[in-house]
Amino acid sequence: MFNKILIANRGEIACRVMETAQKMGVACVAVYSDADASAKHVQIADEAVHIGGAAPADSYLKGDVIIQAALYTGAQAIHPGYGFLSENPDFVDAVETAGLTFIGPSADAIRKMGLKDAAKVLMEKAGVPVVPGYHGDNQDPEHLAGAADAIGYPVLIKAVAGGGGKGMRLVDRPEDFAAALDSARGEARTAFGNDAVLVEKFVAKPRHIEVQVFGDGTYAVHLFERDCSLQRRHQKVIEEAPAPGMTSEMREAMGQAGVRAAEAIGYKGAGTVEFIVDASDGLRPDRFWFMEMNTRLQVEHPVSEAITGVDLVEWQLRVAAGESLPMQQDDLTITGHAFEARLYAEDVPKGFLPATGTLTHLQFPATCRADSGVRAGDTISPWYDPMIAKVIVHGPTREVALEQLHRALQGTEVAGTVTNLSFLGALTRHSGFAAGDVDTGLIGRDLDALIQVAPVPARTLVAAAMTALGLVDTAEETGFSLWAPLHRAVQLQAGDVVDLDVQVEGPNHQVWQVGEDTLRAERGAGGWLIDGTPMPCVAVAGAQVTVFDNYGQVFEIVDPLDRDTSAAGDTNVIEAPMPGLVKAVFAQVGQTVQEGERLAILEAMKMEHSLLAARDGVVAEVLAEDGTQVEAGAALVRLEEE
């Protein structure tokens, strides 16, 4: 076994790898960028090395610098985590050339699975079912359109390189093919530097089911399947294992297909073989097809660990150190059911816009496993993925595990940034998801209901107001002025401004007026009760109050002397919603634009965001240019006054 390894990653996965490695007595070296100098993964490592600037290209993607850090610290091996350099075969070659061990598959295996079209040809030869489609080299638009006609509409255009939904377009009719092809190629060229595409049959009721495999370079086993069908724009939201509705016959077929795929390329380490499944007639062993293989540990690996009792990172270290497979296929069994929900800093009502901010409060219930790379006091940076944590639960049945997930999300407390917590909670209450009737289109179909904002209960407003006025930890003299009960008022803003009035009748009694509602707050031995209900936990940071009720309600304390006269918003100025890089500016001075017209593209949080005109008008000024790094709120384009 290794004495010391370097983790060539950051955040949650770096912390996850260190947790297991350190338990095994292996010292861990962290690497960090300028933005991560005080990050959690740096703090828990045995030692840490600074590798460059905040941008990934200046730090976590600099393979030569990372290898030098490993050599300098005496690390014997490098664990890549996921993302960044984890599936870069040139990095693997460089690691091995330097005399170090790469904790993962060979460069050859990564290359074979790196391009979707070549991988599918290889899988066909290995006896793994693939989706009907065209994966050839001829990229002539007419040839591709002809292939689409032969496959039969609807079809899916997909970029050969990359992932994450970029360079992917669904085409329902032949007359729409050319425009969709141009759009997919343009996005793929920007994201991956490669505009080659493949064309596949679109599956009517698709489920995304993947098989966790593990190999020692010769033989492989599978650790059963995960269902990752609950997606939004091809990004996984909640994953589970095993897949609902799975039959023993189909599990055997999918598992063996995954093993054949791994053994066909001499796979070593943890990997995932992803399949698209047509669930329009239930789960059938003749209705699943290979999509791609991820030659690394997956974000959702904890659900497989939960149902099998296997620590996949431990297996990675042992096999990379020269051991054979720790278990054989017959030794692996499924126990219970597991879910993982991805908690992100993102503004759901604004189209799931990634968010930044300093976490003023972060706490998870003891009933769940929370894999996180941040702590209270840490900042969600614009440079990296805005994940806060993965919330993982395991129960004896799917029904029990789903209820555990619901309760775990209700008990999760986050303050300092907007999150998708209430959206995740809504998914756990979705009737179709609860019944196991899932497919990749579920969220898109029911999005309006899932993001609907519930009215804020009056008791939640009172809890925020009590905290804002300092009326929670009260003494005997609190609330009296000249021997009479004290009347106070406060304004809170969460969209609309709400006026609240309180009559403090003593240290343990308050009467609140919220609109037409009258509520009584009383303190007993167990704390405050608001109209007979225990007061929820509350966190305060400056003028912001977060009440941990209904997944967290955030209020701003309104200063009556500092009113915002422009609360309605300035439709003349298009601003950057977050820090980022101006990728493109389309507006020109004097140009007439329509409401909703794209005026610029901002690149932030590893995604591109279109900035649109808020109204019809004429461009008065263009205040940014391509390649400019801007802060949140920076004015990019100004329209002439109406």
Image (spheres, rainbow, N blue to C red):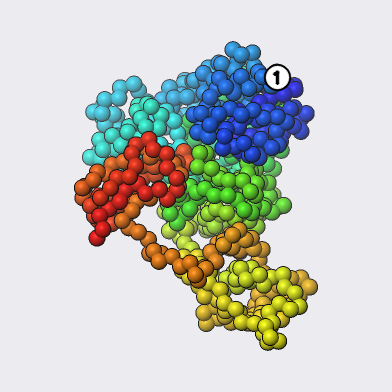
Q: Quadrant of residue 530?
A: bottom right
Front residue of 607 and 425? 607
Q: How many marks?
A: 1
Q: Quadrant of the N terminus?
A: top right
- Seen at 59% across and 55% down, the residue is 415
Residue 52 location (% of width, % of height): 55, 29
Residue 336 location (% of width, % of height): 68, 46
Front residue of 9 and 540? 540
Residue 102 location (% of width, % of height): 62, 21
Q: Quadrant of residue 165?
A: top left
Give the residue pinned by disc 1.
Answer: 74
- Seen at 31% across and 56% down, the residue is 572
Q: Is residue 485 visible?
A: yes
Q: Secondary structure at mark 1?
A: loop
Q: Quadrant of residue 117?
A: top left
Front residue of 303 and 162? 162
Q: Quadrant of the C terminus?
A: bottom left
Residue 307 location (% of width, % of height): 67, 41
Mark 1 belongs to which amino acid? Gly
Q: Is residue 393 above or below residue 410?
A: above
Q: Is residue 236 above or below residue 466?
A: above
- Seen at 68% across and 41% down, the residue is 306
Q: Residues within 10 Å of mark 1 (few under 14, many from 20)?
A: some
Q: Is residue 266 visible?
A: no
- Seen at 45% across and 48% down, the residue is 632
